[in-house]
């Protein structure tokens, strides 16, 4: 059982939006779909949900074509949030859930529970348009999950939420995952993906650049990161070491990138020799660093290949 996306291709006029996208999302996982604007995330999700046909390629869930499953196994939170501005919050939550076969009574109870959990119970009877953007987004999220879909796809669910609401949404997603739901969301906020996702894929210009368990993706460039704080306050010598580039200097600590093939332990030993040391650690690069390195490299290459580049 898994969500398998196999060699999707989709063209819009001159734009090859998807150029052979393959992914595998394990059941019961949170999967982050990362890419720049226009990379192909929404198009992929819309094809998974059978809202759009691919030119080529297939999508299966648990071995059966995605479109052969009943609509109620899927939940979708689109980027352009699709609720009724003038309808009362509780009325539309009940309305959408009943479209998926939930009884009115069950939908009402679940909706009120979720509204309370998201601290917006007092808005249940108000028209949606009278709520703040962030609160409307929480309503949209509730509308997406009330029918208890097995697979949840969300386009940028964290955009526009304040830190408290981000925390609430994160804990809701973790809880749904722990109840066996499979969750895919797109985001530009790589720190959200890093904190939440079991696996991620990075997509660029309709092609998957890398995908896999978050930890493996963070290690995929072969770089490591070291953080050093010397009692003397001076760790500038790091940059003189072969294969070591200082990426962040600062009063509290210095961070450096260690090239593939260079042993980060050698850096640590050098720090100890120069002693006294206040802080010493080796870490994986962040998803953001990996993203910039992998996607940035492709963009740089494209610029050199583009006609007229470098002129
Ligand atoms: P964003 O992060 O900005 O939401 P995305 O990764 O979701 O971007 P898509 O919306 O999938 O990207 O778009 C992929 C490419 O396909 C873009 O170049 C976009 O302009 C193009 N595209 C998407 N939908 C259509 C459409 N209906 N008609 C024409 N072009 C489209």
Image (tube, rainbow, N blue to C red):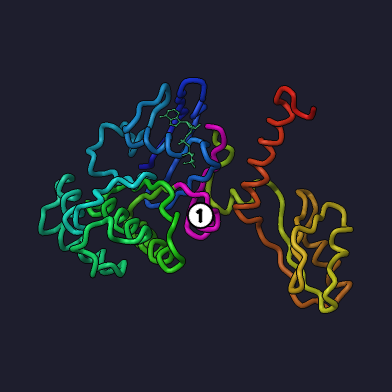
Picture quadrant of residue 90: bottom left
Q: Is residue 189 left or right of residue 185?
A: right
Instruction: State whether label 1 is within 8 Å of ligand 1.
Output: no
Q: Position of residue 152 (x, y in %)?
A: 34, 48
Above or below: residue 15 compared with residue 267: above
- Quadrant, the N terminus: top left
Which residue is more in the foreground, 304 or 65? Answer: 304
Callout 1 crowding tier (Cα within 10 Å): few <14, some 14–19, many ≥20: many
Q: Residue at x 28, y 32 (%)?
A: 67
Percent coordinates x, y for residue 289 in the rendering: 65, 52
**Horizontal and vertical percent for residue 84?**
24, 48
Task: Count how many numbered circles sit on residues in the image.
Answer: 1
55 versus 244 height, above or below: above
- Indicate yes or no whether the magenta region holds residue 267: no
Query: Magenta stretch?
Result: 186-206
Question: Closer to the camera, 46 or 133?
Answer: 133
User: As drawn, is 122 to the left or to the right of 251?
Assistant: left
Report whether 54 appears left or right of 203: left
Asked whether residue 193 is drawn in magenta, I would say: yes
Which residue in the structure is indicated by mark 1? 193
Horizontal arrangement in the rendering, residue 186 relative to residue 225 (left or right): left
Question: Circle 1 sits in a helix, a strand or a loop, which is it?
Answer: helix
Q: Quadrant of the C terminus?
A: top right
Q: Residue at x 72, y 22 (%)?
A: 307
Q: Residue 48: where, in percent of width, then height?
A: 36, 36
22 in relation to 224, above or below: above
Q: Give the residue displayed 71% in from the left and 63% down from the top.
A: 282
Q: Nearer the viewer, residue 86 or 197?
A: 86
């Amino acid at each position: 059982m898994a969500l398998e996306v196999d060699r999707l291709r989709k063209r819009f006029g001159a734009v090859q939006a998807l150029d052979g996208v393959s992914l595998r999302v394990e059941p019961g996982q949170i999967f982050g779909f990362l890419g720049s604007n226009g990379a192909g995330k929404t198009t992929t999700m819309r094809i998974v949900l059978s809202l759009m046909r691919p030119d080529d390629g297939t999508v299966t869930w648990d071995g059966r074509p995605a479109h052969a499953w009943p609509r109620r196994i899927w939940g979708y939170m689109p980027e352009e949030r699709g609720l009724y501005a003038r309808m009362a919050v509780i009325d539309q939550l009940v309305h959408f859930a009943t479209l998926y076969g939930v009884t009115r009574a069950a939908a009402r109870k679940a909706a009120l529970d979720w509204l309370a959990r998201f601290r917006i119970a007092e808005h249940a009877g108000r028209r949606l348009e009278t709520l703040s953007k962030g609160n409307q987004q929480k309503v949209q999220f509730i509308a997406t999950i009330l029918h208890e879909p097995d697979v949840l796809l969300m386009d940028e669910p964290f955009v526009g939420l304040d830190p408290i609401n981000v925390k609430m949404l994160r804990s809701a997603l973790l809880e749904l995952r722990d109840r066996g739901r499979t969750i895919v969301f797109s985001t530009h906020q790589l720190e959200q993906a890093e904190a939440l996702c079991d696996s991620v894929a990075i997509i660029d210009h309709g092609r998957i650049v890398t995908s896999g368990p978050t930890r493996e993706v963070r290690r995929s460039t072969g770089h490591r990161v070291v953080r050093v704080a010397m009692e003397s306050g001076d760790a500038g010598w790091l940059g003189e070491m072969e294969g070591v580039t200082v990426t962040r200097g600062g009063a509290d600590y210095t961070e450096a990138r260690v090239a593939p093939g260079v042993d980060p332990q050698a850096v640590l030993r050098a720090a100890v020799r120069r002693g006294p040391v206040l802080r010493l650690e080796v870490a994986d690069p962040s998803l953001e660093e990996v993203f910039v390195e992998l996607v940035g490299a492709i963009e740089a290459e494209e610029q050199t290949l583009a006609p007229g580049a470098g002129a």
